[in-house]
Amino acid sequence: MLLLAVLACSCVTLTSDGARVKVFRGSLEAEPAQRSMPEGCRLLSSTPPTTTTELDLEGQKDPFRAQRNETGAAGGNALLVLTQMTLSRRESDCPVA
């Protein structure tokens, strides 16, 4: 999956500023209106796309701790993560979706 945020290491601790940041997720392939921040939000910054696995995204309780901390430190209260599947799962016990 391609992200517009750099993924966090599992050892990152959530700060008090980061705890106030809400994460919104959307598909990079969706229409622009369906992948935007809620009304009233403004863009503070963006990061280049990165590649990560589904396990890193879905296998952790809070995979965006580092980004939440950075957003909170910059004065933000919302983080938008856009994803795009680039390679589907190829395991025999899990059907490709």
Image (tube, rainbow, N blue to C red):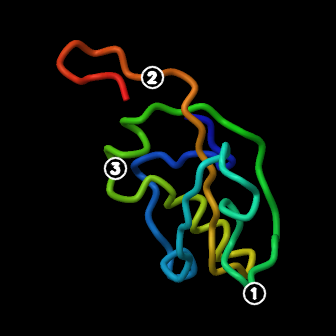
Measure the alpha-carbon separation of dots 3 and 1. Answer: 29 Å
Mark 2 residue type: Ser
Identify the residue at image location x=66%, y=78%. 38
Does label 3 or label 1 sit earlier along the sequence?
1
Mark 1 residue type: Gly
Other residues around mark 1 within 10 Å, as few (<14) / some (14–19) / many (≥20): few
Does label 1 or label 2 sit earlier along the sequence?
1
Identify the residue at image location x=54%, y=32%. 85
Identify the residue at image location x=23%, y=24%. 94
**Mark 3 — residue?**
60
Q: Quadrant of the C terminus?
A: top left
**Mark 1 — residue?**
40
Measure the alpha-carbon separation of dots 1 and 2. Answer: 35 Å
Whether 95 is drawn above or below 61: the answer is: above
Percent x, y of residue 89: 38, 22
Does label 2 or label 3 sit earlier along the sequence?
3
View extreme (bottom): residue: 40
Identify the residue at image location x=67%, y=43%. 29
Percent x, y of residue 86: 58, 25
Whether 73 is drawn above or below 46: the answer is: below
Helix, strand or loop at label 2? It is loop
Q: Nearer the viewer, residue 55 or 83?
A: 83
Mark number displayed over residue 88 = 2
Q: Are marks 1 and 2 in contact (CB under 8 Å)?
A: no
Which is more foreground, mark 2 or mark 3?
2
Percent x, y of residue 55: 36, 36
- Residue 56 shown left or right of residue 7 in the figure: left
Helix, strand or loop at label 3? It is loop
Other residues around mark 2 within 10 Å, as few (<14) / some (14–19) / many (≥20): few
